[in-house]
Amino acid sequence: MASQVSTLPFWRTRRGQERMITAAIFTTLCVGGAVVLLPFFWMLSTALKPAEQVYLSPPVWVPIPPQFINFWTALTRVPFYLYAFNTSIIVVFVMIGTLLSCSFAAYGFARLKAPGKDLIFMLVLGTLMLPGAVTLVPTYLMFNSFGWVNTFLPLIVPSFFGSAFNIFLLRQFYQTLPVELEDAAKIDGANPYRIWWSIMLPLSQPVLATVAVFTFVSTYNDFFTPLIYLSDESKYTIAVALSFFQGSPRIGPQMHLLMAAVTVSLLPPLILFIGAQRFFVRGIVMSGIKG
Amino acid sequence: MQAHPPVGSAIVSDTVPAQRPIRRWNREALHAYVFMSPAILGILIFTLGPVIASLFLSFTEYNIITDPQWVGLANYTELFQERLFWQAFRVSAIYSVVSVPLNLGFALGLAVLLNHKMRGMMIFRSVYYLPTVISGVGVAMLWRWLFNSEFGLINVLLAKVGISGPAWLLDEQWALSALIITSMWSVGGTTLIFLAGLQGIPQELYEAAEIDGAGRWSQFRSITLPLLSNVTFFNLVLGIIGALQVFTDAFVITRGGPNQATLFLAVYLYQHAFLYLNMGYASAIAWFMFLLVMVLTLLVFKSSPLWVFYESERKGN
């Protein structure tokens, strides 16, 4: 056997083939990875250029010396701190609303029995397939009649009414927890609300973290909702403000300042992603397998 | 979901009369409804109510200031005679037909590569997922700059290999392609869902196939593809729904232009609802989109027995 294997050239042996496949995959992934990262490099490169180097052909790849002052200029020419503050308020309240309402509802769906529960759950999942456009106009008109347009309320309040994907994720998790934990509490006379608050919530911290990071990212990146509801410049979120920079004489045509502002705007999700990667991965794995 | 007669109820039913369990059950149902109430109210207030209201509004003329006027089917007949509506429909259709399969194919291929056992794979997975996390307006503006016809990175790189790139966003022929390319960049989200699916496939199946002498390609075709088909199904449905609702990229990168070449249905809807305050007409557009998504989703569901392979079938065989 051994002699037979050794007479084969390396690339024909099993190990050789494995190695070659790994090398091919590695190379492909490196090229693809470069394609993914290149836009970010270009963004940073532009953000660090002095104005006169932006529109040059051939381009300046690495500006020397880098103009870090661009970040300062971009952020102070517009009230960026205000946009950041508005965004934070919205994101924080949406996260609170989502975590509370989704885990609360999910516990009901996972553990309690009631007629029609499965039907309601199907309806909840059905909302995932509904295009947002079809509810858009009446929802807008409703908030308008409340006098809530141009406030943060239309952005925040709906999050207190649960969202299908997160309810689904949390329900899946609650179903994996042993029932014995609750039984012990029931014998001690705890009602379901207490069980949810003091047993289920603490136990579901990892999933809650997953829901939290996804909620952060989607709320932070949301453009359409704040665009239609917020009209005062002083109420803009970062996303909406950015979109108006394009046409703004203060920043607009100056691509280096625009890219500096874009770079800063991408930092919060980037930092979160680097710090909380395992929670992102968990969410994808849970939704992917069960979906 | 499994019935779980709790230890507690057994103790209680020993000591109380027979009708007691029914009352307990009623109380549990009451609690269940309280727990489900955010979701139930959410569906009523933010889904069912608005869906019905927008159907009603689609038969009216309404500009927010004066009361809605019933106009019957006028909005729909106007819609179907409007050139711009058909343009929007065409744009959304082309985009969906091209970008959804392209994204699924790319995502699947990438997922297979990312599933290979190799050191440092976590870094690759993170890199490919990055554009999904970092998305929205900032990235759209970045793409606008990348596609700049003279100084954008894409044409600069194309020039390096001797291709003189098109004017992209300024060119009617190329603007939609530019948006499709943009969508390809964030293929990582779909990829990781495929990857999760791949990792759920039992390794023994491949080992058995290998013993039978099956090559990699036939392993992929007869194990990976069928066992992944339910994930493909999930991604396809969400992909169609997402593609028909593209707004941010079209709004920020091209503003629907040039010459309406990227006027997506969602952008057309936005213009009528929030620029011209044609709430009735906008609702008709919304309902058209809704029906379109429903028909397409239904087609995918109906066709699924032909190509989606369920776990139970495997166990049955």
Image: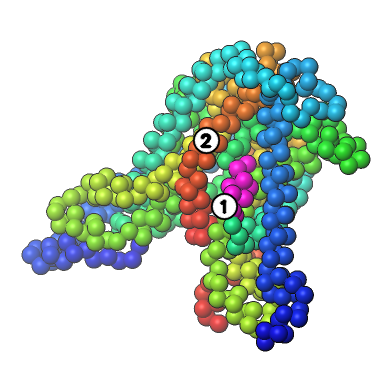
- Looking at the image, which residue is at 43% across and 34% down? A94
Question: Considering the image in quadrants, where does the C terminus of chain B appear?
Answer: bottom right
Residue type highlighted by circle 1: Met
Residue A285 appears in the figure: yes
- Figure check: A72 above or below A113: above
Which percent across, then down, holds residue A269?
54, 35
Up/down of A255 relative to B220, above or below:
above
Q: Residue at x 39, y 45 (%)?
A: A208
Residue A150 image position (x, y, % from top left): 51, 20
- Say whether mark 1 and mark 2 are on the same chain: no
Taking the magenta stretch, the answer to whether it contains residue B250 is: no
| Segment tinted magenta in the rendering | B120-131
Quick check: B277 above or below B112? above
The disc at residue A87 is none
Residue B189: % across, % down: 60, 49
Secondary element under disc 2, as helix, strand or loop, is helix
Percent x, y of residue B158: 85, 39
Q: Label 2 belongs to which residue?
A: A271
Circle 2: residue type:
Ile
Counting other residues with Cα less than 10 Å from the Cα at mark 1, is it few (<14), some (14-19), or many (20 or more)?
Answer: few
Seen at 52% across and 35% down, the residue is A271
**Label 2 – label 1 distance at C-alpha:** 17 Å
Chain of the residue where label 1 is placed in the rendered structure: B
Q: Which residue is mark 1?
A: B122
